[in-house]
Image: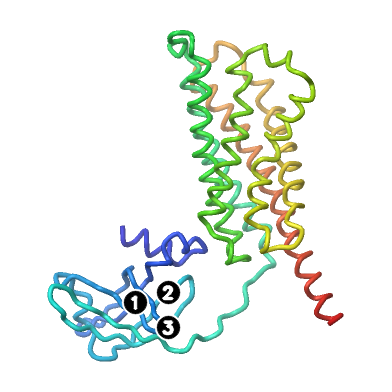
Amino acid sequence: MNPIAGWLLRTPLHDLLSERVALLALTGRRSGAAIRLPVRYEQRGDTLTVVSRPSRRWWRNLDEGSPVRLTLRGRARHGHATAVRADPVVVVTIRLAAEQPGPPQAQGRLWWRWTKAVTLGEITGFAVPAVVAAQVAGPEWTLLGIGPLLQGAAIVMAGAVEGMILGLAQAYVLRAALPAIPTRAWVRATAAGAVIAWSVGVLPIVLGERIVRWPPAVLVLLGLSLLGSMGLLQARVLRGQVREAWRWVIASAGSWLIALGAFALVTTPLWQEGQPGWLVVTIGVLGGVVMAATVAALTGAAIVRLLSSGDDRCRRERRLS
């Protein structure tokens, strides 16, 4: 798991681990080779404490005050480390050097990075409910007359996985511009919004034609929930980090409305009754690619607009003050 953890600690999603894990880099005392490994740490002020097992050999490269490099909470830091054998463990103390200001974050390519990452994330995520929906469409799911309910539950659970994947893709880009956005909170909000949306989306499967007899006001409310749930929950995470976060609800809902329309335009003429499962999945994935690219481009433009408007307002306020 070390290579995976090391990669994650160097990405904008580092906060999934970095509250307790840092990436330590040092040089082999005899070999001169670069050694890089994730370590659990405790921090007090400018001092980190790392506890290791004596059977691990990396700490033996540390003399008193050996220079080391760290990726600590997403930032490159330098320090000096000392290892002390204290049976049954080894205690490594790292004193951090003064933090050097890094280069400013590049904002110009935010839309393009968002569009690429979110398109890939949504394609990957949407493949999960597409495959599950094809698998549960068979007659064997009519067991005991509760087949539609089982089908709906399976699709909603797959939709939660889609939301998690999409949330991670969005957070990967968003945190580069807003490092204070917690990855876990953003992924939870995205997954919860996806669960609400898919729960509304499977109602025709569960209820059949009965749903068309519901009052129009209820159907409109369900449609608003399907389109706006994800943006509403995500806006709660954005609140306090950007101005007028409520605008994200409208932008997200509008983007999903257009993207779902694009999905329907692609898949409706192609899906026919009696098609084999692999063809149903293929058509669904094709529509998912169109939907993913559409929602990624539109929400990307919205997030760039949201962040730039906040920056412009901050600059105006500083000039007035």
Q: Tell me the quarter of the picture where residue 68 sits.
A: bottom left
Q: Where residue 184 sits: x, y (%)? A: 50, 54
In this picture, is 227 found above or below 51?
Answer: above
Q: Residue furthest bottom?
A: 64
Q: Where residue 24 sits: x, y (%)? A: 34, 75
Label 3: how many Cα within 10 Å (few below 14, some 14–19, many 20+): few
Q: Secondary structure at mark 3?
A: loop
Residue on which disc 1 sits? 25
Q: Which mark is residue 212?
A: none
Residue 89 located left or right of residue 236: left
Between 275 and 186, the one lying in front of the other is 186
Q: Secondary structure at mark 1?
A: strand
> Which-is-in-front pick, marks 3 and 2?
3
Residue occupying image coordinates x 16% and y 81%: 85
Q: Where residue 291 sits: x, y (%)? A: 66, 37
Residue 152 located left or right of residue 107: left
> Which-is-in-front pick, marks 3 and 1?
3
Label 1: how many Cα within 10 Å (few below 14, some 14–19, many 20+): some
Residue on which disc 2 sits? 71
Residue 121 located left or right of residue 59: right
Residue on which disc 3 sits? 45
Between 254 and 226, the one lying in front of the other is 226
**Dot 2 amino acid type:** Thr
Mark 3 or 2 closer to N-term?
Answer: 3
Query: How many numbered dots are placed on residues in this image?
Result: 3
